[in-house]
Amino acid sequence: MTGHDKKRSFWPASYRSFLFISTIVLLSSAPWFYGLTRLRDQLVAELLIFSFFLISVPVFNWDRILDQGTHLRETADRWVLSALLLSFLYVLISSLPYQSLLAFFRFLSVVLFYFLIRDFVDTKKKFHIFLWGIVILGTVYAVYGLAQYYGFLPHPYWRGKYELASRYVNGGHFAAFLVFPFFGAASLLAAERNVSAKASLGMMLCLQGWALLLTRSRTIWLSLLVGVGVLIYLMKRQRLLSGKIVVGLLLLAAVSGTFFWSLGFLDPVIHRIESLWKSNFFSLFHRWHMWEGSLRAVVSRPWGWGLGTFGEILPQFRTHSDRFLIDYAHNEFLQVGVDLGIPGILFLTGFIVFFLRRFALLRASHPSSVEPVIALGFFATGVSLFLASQADFPIRIYATGLLFAAYLGLTVFLFETRKERRQEEAFVQPAGRSRNSKSLVIRWIGVFIILAAGCFVARQLFAEIHFERGFKLEKDFSWEGAHGEYQRSISWAPFYVAPHVAQGDLYRKRASLAMNRDQKQEYRRRAIEAFQRAASLQSRGAGRIHYVLGLLFNEIGDIKQSRFHLEAAVHQAPMNAIFVSEYGYQALEWGDQERAIELFEQFQKIRFQESTHADPCEILRRFSKHTQKYQDLRRVVDDRLEDHLCLGYVLGEVGEWDFSRAEFDAALLRSQSRYGPNAAMKNTGEAIARFYVLHERLQDALGIYEEALKHDPENTDYRKELISISGQLGRAAGQGDAA
């Protein structure tokens, strides 16, 4: 090689090294912005990745990726490209195309990040540098989180005060992030020969482990425990650990656990586990209902609703109360099933099987080399993530998704070491010198797609910035300025629903405060126009939009349109207690008693995980103004103690004492079943007796206290009430005889 050739190869190699370091920096900064959970941060990250990929095009080795294998199943890269193609297909057939397009560009950025890792990590040295970078990254964020947890740094954005989340919002999200560096440190610890390096890795592993415990994520704890078990088992099979060492590790864990438990350090863990059954397994039941609703959505449209549409589609198929916002299925197969249908589930299964086969081949080859040893840690990472993904969404958070892309890229590098396809020195394809015409065509098509994606995302980013400005101005009562910002947001992204809805809410707010009748009507008209535009842009998941339209049309006296939109609201969100109950009240006001009764029958079927969101007494009192028929009133409430009690009150107030007495008897029976005879009298019987006395039903009140004294004959308060009521009855009888 001549001096001129060396000079020509030096600059591309230096540029690639710079891009390699920049990739690590980009990955390291992603969790800092709350895990990239805010839309604006996500859009900025997408633009950075698109730009980063474009500036890497001159030295990106397209041929090495595109020329691998001859069949789709032969390379991980082609699986990833196929996933991208499948995702784009589900943009074209999506029930919500704009929502799917946003999700596609986010997924495209993750795929591009994967290929950046694949291309820049082209030597074993770079592989180890990147892996060490991930371990150090995890340790830094763990230490930062520990400082926050123990009060040295603020954490006002944490969802739970005592759930360590570092720069994430949710402790469970941060726990999922730590899975990667934790097993990375464990695998490096097994592979390293340097004592100082082992000591450093051991310390980082302890810090990450302590942070993981304080995240209070039961899902990650369980999946991590299984992953560690798998790692120890495989390392023993590879003869990297002897039986004595395994027993020693278990004894050390037991002794350490006992020691820390005695000092109270494990109290957060114990309390978190106890909370599972103290809350009557609320978390498990909540997930079960989410999975049930997700499965119903898959069955309803087996070919899939569209990429990224889960959050908008699920309300139509939920089987329990919608107090909680659910935009993830907490099960990766069901999440993919709703978005991409049965084809997506089959593709995901094939992808997992592909990686399992490659891991098996890697473990069987070169058992004495470093790469298969590290691969065991990568395999354990995959096991933990797979298990966690069955009850949570560990890789759906954008920052963690980028880390997962890096994990896949490093894993594929390990796969390639089996065939020794990578060289110790990076191969750099000089820009514009490829002899492969297919590669050149694909390169330019790829550049065009990324440029187009970048333009779209940039417009969406500007729209989001103006939308957020408008929201802040609205909170400060600068309504004219807010309206202008919302309008600018719409001009940047006309198909973005949020600013249309915000405009409608602003007009509706101004209508409620306007004193002039004509001005009030004008604001209502503008609000209706804004919400109608929003409804036309979002055909699914628009329950609130239709609900507000129904209320607005009712305010201007258009009953037909109001009914249409309220029907659409309860159709798209049948488990929304507010939509169902308010439509029921509205139907009652319109004189449509049968539809109102049907809606409240539907309301009673909503599964509330904690308590009902409406007072049955209020429902019955409002109904009793329109009908006093016992059969109608009985249909609008449930078969619970509170419902029978309220129905008894309402029926008594309208003079239906025979039915009222039957409902009170039913309430007492359920109270006795719930609290026991004595407590039932205290909680329910006394209230019924007072109601009887207030309405001069003294004989019925007397019967209540006589029954109570049978169970508690020593109760002086009940005996006094019995004597008092008996005296009143006696005086009433005497007055009757005298007359």
Image (tube, rainbow, N blue to C red):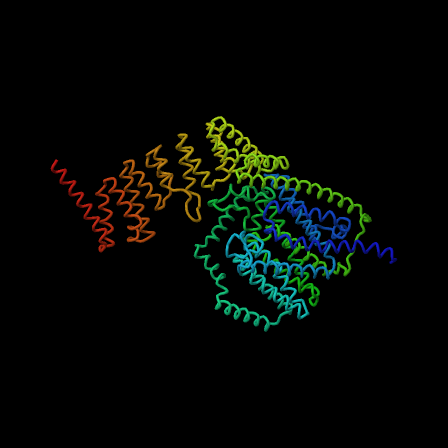
How far across and how far down the image is residue 650, in percent? 32, 38
Q: For the image shown, how many numbered marks are present on the structure?
A: 0
Judge from the rendering whether residue 301 lies leftward or rightward of residue 46; answer left or right: left
Answer whether residue 350 is visible to the viewer in this image: no
- State the quadrant of the C terminus: top left
The image quarter containing residue 363 is bottom right
Q: Looking at the image, which residue sits at the far right?
A: 2
Up the image or down, 391 lies above or below 547; here it is below
- State the quadrant of the N terminus: bottom right
How far across and how far down the image is residue 540, in percent? 55, 38
Judge from the rendering whether residue 563 lies leftward or rightward of residue 175; answer left or right: left
Towards the viewer: 585 or 52: 52
Q: Looking at the image, which residue sits at the far left?
A: 738
* Residue beneath the point at 23% across and 51% down: 718
Judge from the rendering whether residue 568 lies leftward or rightward of residue 649; answer left or right: right
How far across and how far down the image is residue 74, in percent? 70, 53
Towards the viewer: 629 or 562: 562
